[in-house]
Amino acid sequence: MKPPKASELLTWYDAHARRLPWRALPGELSDPYAVWLSEIMLQQTTVATVGPYFQKFLLKWPTVGDLAAADIDEVMHAWAGLGYYSRARNLHACAKQVATDHGGIFPDDEEGLAALPGIGPYTAAAVASIAFDRQAVVVDGNVERVIARIFDIREALPGAKKPIKEMTATLTPKIRPGDFAQAMMDLGATICTPRRPSCDRCPWTKSCKARKAGDQETLPVKAPKKVKPTRKGAAFWAVRKDGAVLIRKRVPKGLLGGMMEVPSTEWVEESRDETEHLAQAPLAKAKWKKRIGEVRHTFTHFHLVLELYEASISLKTKADGEWVLPEDLGDHALPTVMKKVVALALQDENENAGPLFKATRRK
């Protein structure tokens, strides 16, 4: 069986490369800012999802200096819906450091890139390779799948990461390493897919040991997934007499840090009764009424179930947060789970929805 050659993959890439908004066209130089921005957005997020966000960011902040000068709340709002919000905070911190300490120019090697906020070994390698054509070993999920199949690596992930990276290093060329890295990603995304790979169209089909064995779809082997626990909590929909609702900013660190929320309790695995929920309500003296229905959302490591309580609040009531009309909530950085809370609160179609919720929706 002949060994795979980088030249074979690059020839295939020249004919079949995906057109992506952050990818330089043939003959053009890559924009390090665009490459870095896309790589941060693509962490644990699909290309289809990232595309519109990337274009919106680039239109709003065309350079790393523009992003560095932006208000963090504005950045968080633009990021809302992409998830993993610590990435947005690190994105802004990294932009500021590049603008302040590096004159708006990204370091061009892995070591310099890895010293920046939010850039780990993979992202450092990807940016160094794609933006600066450094001979860096770039291994994402697509590359793991390709290499595990080509070399028939049967050790389960994450243990297989080391041998996969070692074998990727043996293939990474000195010439056009950035194109090679992107070609590997494209091969995994379009040909060497998790299910029903198109082996007959693969440039390395004659070099693939897993295909020869006839069990390419079983690789890479993954360790059994852990059962996700379910956490529970409550959210509080406080509506003032003028129709404005109370929202507040979450603490900067931790899950959804720095995002806006409909005030909620701690999210815990233990069941809590209404008395325990109301002990954490934002306005202790308000007459809270439990809403029929619940909000369900899944994060990376757990499922979440939120009960919803409503209350009508006097205009004179002071609260820790902001009063916002429902039609203006889109101007604030609400994460997806909180958008679900709002949707439940404003669900006119639900026959159990009280007049309090109907009053907040403007005609």
Image (spheres, rainbow, N blue to C red):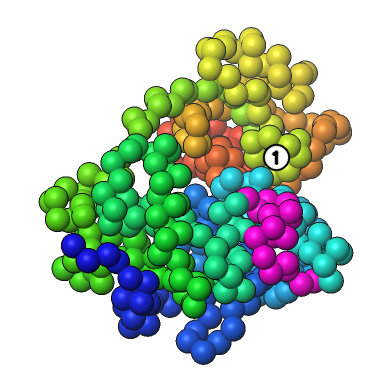
Residue bounds of the magenta highlight = 104-120
Residue 156 higher or lower than 140, as above or below: above
Measuring from the top left, give residue 25's x and y in whole percent.
Answer: 49, 84
| Quadrant (top left, top right, bottom left, bottom right) of the N terminus | bottom left
Instruction: Give the prevailing secondary structure in the magenta stretch.
Output: loop
Residue at left offset 22%, top offset 59% = 208
Residue at left offset 86%, top offset 64% = 100
Measuring from the top left, give residue 169's x and y in whole percent.
Answer: 46, 59
Q: Nearer the viewer, residue 182 or 296?
A: 182
| Quadrant (top left, top right, bottom left, bottom right) of the C terminus | bottom right
View extreme (bottom): residue: 27
Corner quadrant of residue 147: bottom left
Q: Is residue 119 left or right of residue 51?
A: right
Q: Specify whether residue 16 is painted magenta.
A: no
Q: Nearer the viewer, residue 282 or 72?
A: 72
Corner quadrant of residue 105: bottom right
Instruction: Find disc 1 in the rendering and name its residue.
Output: 257
- For the question of whether residue 328 can be seen, the reply is no
